[in-house]
Amino acid sequence: MKLSGARVEAFLRSPDPKIRAVLVFGPDSGLVRERVQRLIQGVVDNPSDPFRVAELSPAMLKAEPSRLLDEAGAMALGGGRRVVVLRDAGDSHSAALSAVLAEARGDSLVVVEGGELGPRSSLRKLAEGADNAAALACYADEGGSLAAVISEELKAAGLMAEPDAMAYLIDHLGGDRRLTRAELGKLALYMGGPGRIGLDDAIACVGDTAALGLDDLALATADGDHAGAQRVLDRLLREGAHPVAMLRGVSRHFLRLHLAAGHLARGKPMDQAMAGLKPPVIFKAVDRFRRQLGRWPVDRLGRALDVLTEAEADCKTTGMPAAEIASRALMMIARAAARR
């Protein structure tokens, strides 16, 4: 079965004992790891207890194909439900998981940690279709969910972000849950104690770190710098950034261009059109942003946003390599910008 909405939190707090296995997968690797950890903690008091928690790798299953089934059927030496975690799983492990779901021996919870699995993935289909299994997709935080994560993390440190600062954080975080929490922890350390976070604080701490590569990619794409955009894209992929996060970073930039271009089309001068953006354009990119507004009229910005939206949907639904889909979309937009 699929887990979504409010059912996710309830299940993470207390996994249903009728569920034999949970597949946790998706492009946000930080969120995948976080939810796997919460599932373990929902079953055992001490996740480091070797008698209650067993971790397996694909190499272990390759050497001993029945290992997952054996671990799932084993009983804890001191009693209590066990957790068996399979890391870095893929479709090649569908048969091993199917054997676990068909076996009635033992009550261990098998947690399968996967990466991005398309709708045609056999492992995903197995977990979604079985009555005694669950599939939990983990996509990058955005919009309301990202705001909730930011507020939760800041509140724990006694901090609250002012509206402009919150808008800036939402615009510059969200590609990966683990990185988002790390950046917010750094911001809390920078603030030095409870209080209110202003826009200058957010820019000073986050502006040149978490979103630097995405900003570079967005600016190069909107500039029409085909070669520059490709270099940044390749670097981000080598560093482990997810294509969907890249597409969303570029989309945010084009949405801001679209808003400012709309003001220009209604007769506002350039300075006023840009002044209405929240958060404001960082000073290092002001001149480039001006030139891009001259290059991109409203209708062409709308078409570029359509391309980005369709590319993100294709990354999630077609099963094709997400990196290739994102690269094709971004290079198409960069070439369009170069043609003015």
Image: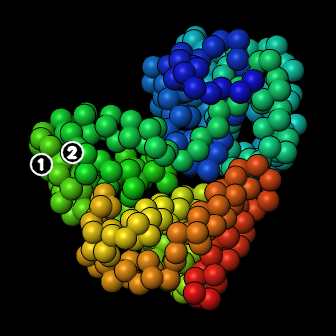
| Left or right: where 255 falls relative to 184 | right
Q: Residue at x 59, y 72 (%)?
A: 300
Q: Is residue 184 or residue 282 the one in the foreground?
A: 282
Residue 24 image-quadrant placement:
top right
Label 1 CA crowd tier, 10 Å (few <14, some 14–19, many 20+): few
Image coords of residue 100 (percent x, y): 81, 25
Name which residue lies at 83% across and 35% down.
Answer: 125
SS assignment at label 2: loop
Residue type highlighted by circle 2: Glu
Residue type at mark 1? Answer: Gly
The residue that disc 2 covers is 162
Q: Is residue 139 visible?
A: yes
* Mark with earlier residue (2, 1): 2
Within 10 angstroms of label 2, few (less than 14), some, or many (20 or more) residues?
some
Tell me how far mark 2 sits from mark 1, CA to CA: 17 Å
Residue 161's spot in the image, x, y percent? 23, 44
- Vertical side of 98 occupied by 171: above or below: below
Q: Which residue is mark 1?
A: 192
Viewer-side label of 2, 1? 2
- What colour scheme has been applied to the protein in the rendered image? rainbow
Compare residues 5 and 277 and report the one nearer the observer: 277
Q: Residue at x 62, y 50 (%)?
A: 27
Q: Position of residue 286 (x, y in %)?
A: 31, 78
Give percent across and percent down for residue 287: 33, 83
In the depicted structure, whether residue 133 falls above or below residue 95? above
Locate the N terminus by quadrant.
Answer: top right
In the depicted structure, whether residue 183 falls above or below residue 39: below
| Residue at the image position 14 percent from the left and 43 percent from the top | 196
> 298 or 151, which lies in front?
298
